[in-house]
Amino acid sequence: MNISITEDNHCYENAMAERINGILKDEFYLDQTFDNETRA
């Protein structure tokens, strides 16, 4: 099984998807880790 959000060899589409993922992580703190459940 190949996992891909774009068709083969579309590096520009992948760059756009990576940028959107970065924005979502920044806006919604998706890449944040917590010390314990209370802080989460």
Image (cartoon, grey):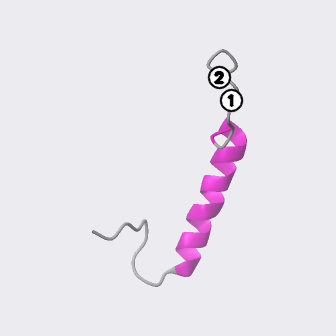
The residue closer to the viewer here, 5 or 38, is 38
Is 20 contained in the magenta span?
A: yes
Identify the residue at the far left of this view. 1
For the point 70% across and 19% down, which residue is it? 39
Figure check: 37 above or below 24: above
Figure check: 9 above or below 5: below
Check if mark 2's residue and mark 1's residue have beta carbons within 8 Å.
yes
SS state under label 1: loop
Q: Amino acid at mark 2?
A: Ala
- Percent across and percent down for residue 5 are 43, 65
What is the quadrant of the C terminus in the image? top right
Q: Which residue is mark 2?
A: 40
Figure check: 21 above or below 12: above
Q: Is residue 12 left or right of residue 23?
A: left
Q: Is residue 7 left or right of residue 28?
A: left
Question: How many angstroms separate mark 2 from mark 1 (CA)?
Answer: 6 Å
Identify the residue at the far top of this view. 38
- Percent across and percent down for residue 12 are 58, 77
The residue closer to the viewer here, 18 or 2, is 2
Tell me the number on the disc at residue 34. Answer: 1
Is 28 contained in the magenta span?
A: yes
- Percent across and percent down for residue 36 are 66, 22
Quarter of the image for residue 14 reads bottom right
For the point 37% across and 66% down, which residue is it? 3
Q: Amino acid at mark 1?
A: Phe
Overall secondary structure of the magenta stretch?
helix
Point out the stretch of residues depicted in magenta.
11-30
Q: Residues within 10 Å of mark 2 (few under 14, many from 20)?
A: few
SS state under label 2: loop
